Amino acid sequence: MPGKAAKVVVTERQQKFLEEFSRSRSEAKAISQRATIILLAFDKKSNEEISIALRLERKQVGLWRRRWQQAWESLTRLECAEPRRLGEAIRETLRDAPRSGRPGTFTAVQITLILALACEPPSQSDRPITHWTPRELRDEILKRKIVDSISVSRVGHFLREAALQPHRRKMWLNTTEKDPEVFEQAVDEVCKTYLNAPILGQQGMHTISCDEMTGVQALERAAADKPLRPEQIAREEFEYIRHGTTTLIGSFDVVSGEMCDSSIGPTRTEVDFVAHIQHTVAADPTGEWVFIVDTLNTHWSAGLVEWIAQECEPDRPLGKKRQSGCAQKPSHASRIPFRSGPPHPVRVFAEA
């Protein structure tokens, strides 16, 4: 007579991951199938019903119910302590248990040296690349004689096991503002501008994110592309002819998600930026415009202040550049209140 089926308990977050694995087309079939077993068991289905639905033996269904029951307490503790690791922990629970086999080919010291190498910049090994690939790593491992022989796939396996991704890069940016209160005020101002954009947009205000893409290369392929053919993808000539560089200045409407204006030219000078702002505002000269820009010096320029003054307060004295007033230099500080302050229909805020 068959024994009693293991009781399956699932938290709300665990259920979310199990449903994701069950539906996924990128997960291994075994993982998806076992996630479905747990979900059906949680839905009070018997082993026999599950085995019929998934065309499995009852013994398999019972095995994975017991496996989940045994792992559930540790999974729940992990969910409370380190929720970000829960998905991978559930995936590991649904994998096959380690099998006995021959001893590992590589020692712990060798594996550690391989992973340490992956954390070094390739330039340290005199390699003309910016990112390690498993093949480049394999070549350097053999060159340094860390091991006598190793495959590219085994190197990739070690990287995955250690959660190392040397082929990827993320960027970060540190503010140059030294005063934390000033920095916090600038961040708060810009964030509020973004958050209020949809509401103010209904009142006719345009909220624009504006920036330059510098050094865009104008390239021409040395030969025409070869078209797609049966059993052959389209091919593109690798060699190119460079026709110099150009600068693209774009104005992005943060409410509609559209590029509302762009300017292309060889430089990104003060004159170029002011001309771009003028051209953008000309699309609705009677409307209100708020531009969000970075702290590039051309975005703080006296020329921009002078144009805003000419459009908004033609009778206001600005002083003289390098001497006094809101057009003075080099501090830029006197320009900020005028450039970003109401009641101007054209205002410019700088990101921190």
Image (cartoon, helix red, strand yellow):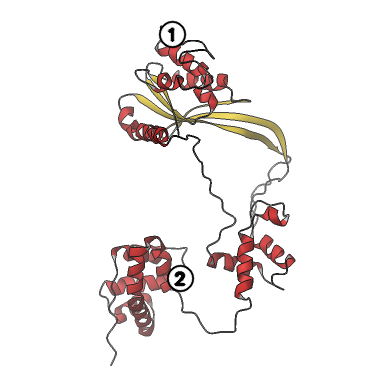
Q: CB atoms at circles 2 and 1 under 8 Å apart?
A: no
In the image as oriented, which residue stretches furthest toward the left? 44
Q: Which quarter of the rendering shows the N terminus?
A: bottom left
In the displayed structure, does residue 159 sit left or right of residue 344? Answer: right
Image position of 83 (left or right of 172): left
Q: Quick check: 237 above or below 47? A: above
Element at label 2: helix
Q: Is residue 19 visible?
A: no
Residue at the extreme bottom of the image, as rendered: 1
Q: Which mark is residue 317?
A: 1
Q: Residues within 10 Å of mark 2 (few under 14, many from 20)?
A: few
Q: Secondary structure at mark 1?
A: loop
Identified by mark 1, the residue type is Pro
Q: Quadrant of the C terminus?
A: top left
Which image quadrant is residue 115 in?
bottom right
Q: Residue at x 62, y 72 (%)?
A: 109
Residue 269 percent across, percent down from the top left: 59, 23
